Amino acid sequence: MLRFITCFAILALANISTTAAADPPRWAIDHAKSHLHFISKWQGAPVKGVFKTWSGDIRFDPADLAASSVAIEINTASLDTAYKDRDDGLRGSDGFKSDTFPMATYKAATFRDLGGGKYEADGVLKIKDLEAPVTLPFMLEISGNTAVMTASVGLSRIALGLGKGQWKDTSIIKDEVSVEIRVEAMREKQAAAAPAEPEPEEASGRIGQARPTLGTKQMAVAANNHATEAAYKTLRAGGSAADAAIAAQFVLNLVEPQSSGIGGGAFLLYWDPVTKQMTALDGRETAPAAAGPDYFLNASGKPMKFWEAVVGGRAVGAPGTLALLAEMHQRYGKLPWADLLEPAIRLAETGFAISPRLAGAIAKAQAKGLDTFPATRAYFFQADRQPKPSGARLQNPAFAKTLRLIAKDGAKAFYDGPIGQEITAKVQAASNPGLLSASDLKAYRVKDRQAICAPYRGYDVCGFPPPTSGGVGVLQALTMLGQHDLKAIGPGAQAAHLFAAAMKRVYADRARYLADPDFIDVPTKGLIDAGYLQQRGAEIDPTKAGGKAKAGEPPGAPAPMAAPIQPPEKGTSHIVVRDQWGAALSMTTTIETGFGSRLMAGGFLLNNELTDFSRAPVRKGLLVANRVEGGKRPRSTMSPVIVMKDGAPALLVGSPGGSRIIGYVAGAIINVIDFDMPVAAALAAGHVSNRNGPTDLEAGTSAEALAADLTAMGHKTRIRDLNSGLAAIRVHGDGKLEGAADPRREGFALGD
């Protein structure tokens, strides 16, 4: 309780933010020269408090005050408080029901230039369900490349409205809280800050170091320890690669619900060592038969905003993941179907501890409507709508019931049974209802596609064809870069420049040509044609970055169509498995945005995959290839890859990461093949990303050091978090297996 009272004003100042209208320079905070503390009284006794753990972001441009912003966040659990002449005997005995903070927002007004490098800004603190807003000013002083921000304010608890009606003795809430903040920061010279654009799930930072796993017989890698363990135990029990991936996917649905599940879709590449065939199975979601190009247009004929389209039933497509799992099992399974669901059933019934990454994702998604619908709110939030914290035990009896039905009746219970009935009822009754019907579910079919392959440095790289753009994009990038001796060039600015230039051309072609080939004439063969890519690669200046790349004209290119403005998958995961018989798979699986549509049915989240279509069917007078049509599959960027050597799998790799997936996967392949990196190092290496615009460099990695050289070559560079989730298994020539998972997420590899 004491923490609640004495810290609330400092918490308010610790949520200072403005909406940036431009891209001002970033100022890196020097924590050693900064402090955040308060001096208060508790019934007359002095109290001093210091927050040990806090972070901040200062983006300030004296020439563009309207775009400048300051944001500071603190970890309230890190409070170190010292009391003089009194103990903390009042905690828990003063009438408050909990030791938590109410909702608060702080919006800063326009900065005022006071002259001499000094600036002032007012802010308005709004506290949910409490008194009127409170004005909290702060000062910012610039001297060369150093900025110092200070704030000092005295506020009574009565002014904040804290404790009103809570105590019989109101004298104890009349004391003032004196808050003092001093933040010193240095201007980042190398790169501009990244714009405020949605990322594929919120970055959770590096969970730890990438740890290699070695083996000779079998191996599995998934994005969560529970899923990897389920897959590995399945392999040890005599299961095939398909069996292991099925077990892992059901568990991921439970422990990583924001990323994938049976309410979503997936793409699978599978190598069968008996037939020597590469199979590409398409479990992508489909649009309802009744949907048309105007599906996401509002009453005035304008495209719905992204989040208006996401939350609710409108963006839910017919899920394909379960149908894909069932097809995998029918073709390649060795263990009984029901056995593969047991790990997930057991975990759903007994419960599991919420991981730090999942807890962070829940908290951040609340602002985007995760607590909108009753079933979802009850599952992810406490009774007071506070997000369930890391370490809390999460049980899902509804999902266990769903899995038992599927274990007994197979996919039929989902596509033509009680589970499907619940799905369509939820979609049609939700706010922002959708058109998904029972007939759409019953008509869903997994599609056999032809894997696409291209040579690279003596290997054959095989990827997934459209409707995903991932396979085409990875092959295009590698083929263009094959004209350069990257091994001799080595990791560094020159290689990063060539990589970024190739990726610009990949994304220009992606925007123009890629869509569902069952509806649109996609020139897949032309896009990966060696002659065409030789020409595209020759456009790259090895010493200078150009502007935005234009789409090329590959052989068989159709009539011009407009390039859509399309958000990427944001809730995605990847699984790779190699079994004792030599079968191997690479599978990327998604529900689109993190936590999908926010709708739950049967204990699992439903996708919002239809927002992967262009919400505007026409752009610049031309039809958009990726427009909504009934039964159509939206374009994707998922890039499951199997790299072959001498007729056998040599590298299994893939990643989540939205529209950046192509670069993540291509970069990992280059790290292994060209730069001879061990798998763990290849996945952990700093990312360079370009989607036909600025060149993004991963914050906190060696990639940051490339900014100066790349800027000198003409790149507009930005430092930002890049949230991949790579998973890979390398099969060496002597048969040894080497696997690892991306340290940016929670996965790991297991094998023997």
Image (cartoon, grey):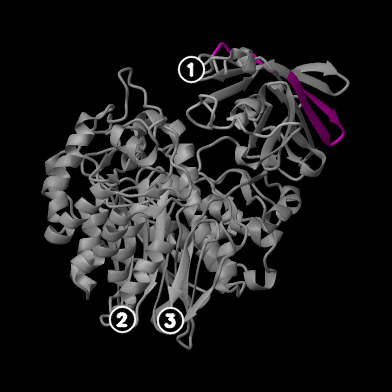
Please state the horizontal and vertical placement of residue 413, each as a whole percent of the image. Answer: 13, 52
Please indicate, yes or no, whether residue 432 appears anywhere in the rendered image: yes
Query: Which quadrant is home to the C terminus?
Result: bottom left
Mark 2 touches mark 1? (CB < 8 Å) = no
- Say whether residue 148 is magenta: yes
Left or right for 23, reference 567 = right
For badge 1, the amino acid type reads Asp
Q: Is residue 80 above or below residue 329?
A: above
Q: Residues within 10 Å of mark 1 (few under 14, many from 20)?
A: few
Left or right for 77, reference 532 = right
Q: In this view, does 716 lie above or below 661?
A: above
Per the image, label 2 sits on a secondary structure element best described as loop
Q: Mark 2 points at which residue?
A: 273
- Determine the residue located farthest toward the top in the rendered image: 132
Residue appearing at x 62%, y 48% in the figure: 696
Left or right for 274, reference 305 = left
Q: Nearer the viewer, mark 2 or mark 3?
A: 3
Q: Name the residue under label 3.
A: 752
Q: Is the magenta stretch mostly helix, strand or loop?
A: strand
- Say whether residue 279 is magenta: no
Q: How many marks?
A: 3
Please state the horizontal and vertical placement of residue 213, each as a whole percent of the image. Answer: 50, 75
Query: Which quadrant is home to the N terminus?
Result: top right
Q: How far apart are labels 2 and 1 at the CA level?
A: 64 Å
Please state the horizontal and vertical placement of residue 747, each as a whole percent of the image. Answer: 47, 62
Q: In this view, does 725 lie above or below 646?
A: above
Per the image, label 3 sits on a secondary structure element best described as loop
- Magenta-drawn segment: 131-153
Q: Mark 1 points at which residue?
A: 129
Q: How far apart are labels 1 and 3 at the CA level?
A: 57 Å
Tag 1 or tag 2, which sits nearer the N-term? 1
Per the image, label 1 sits on a secondary structure element best described as loop
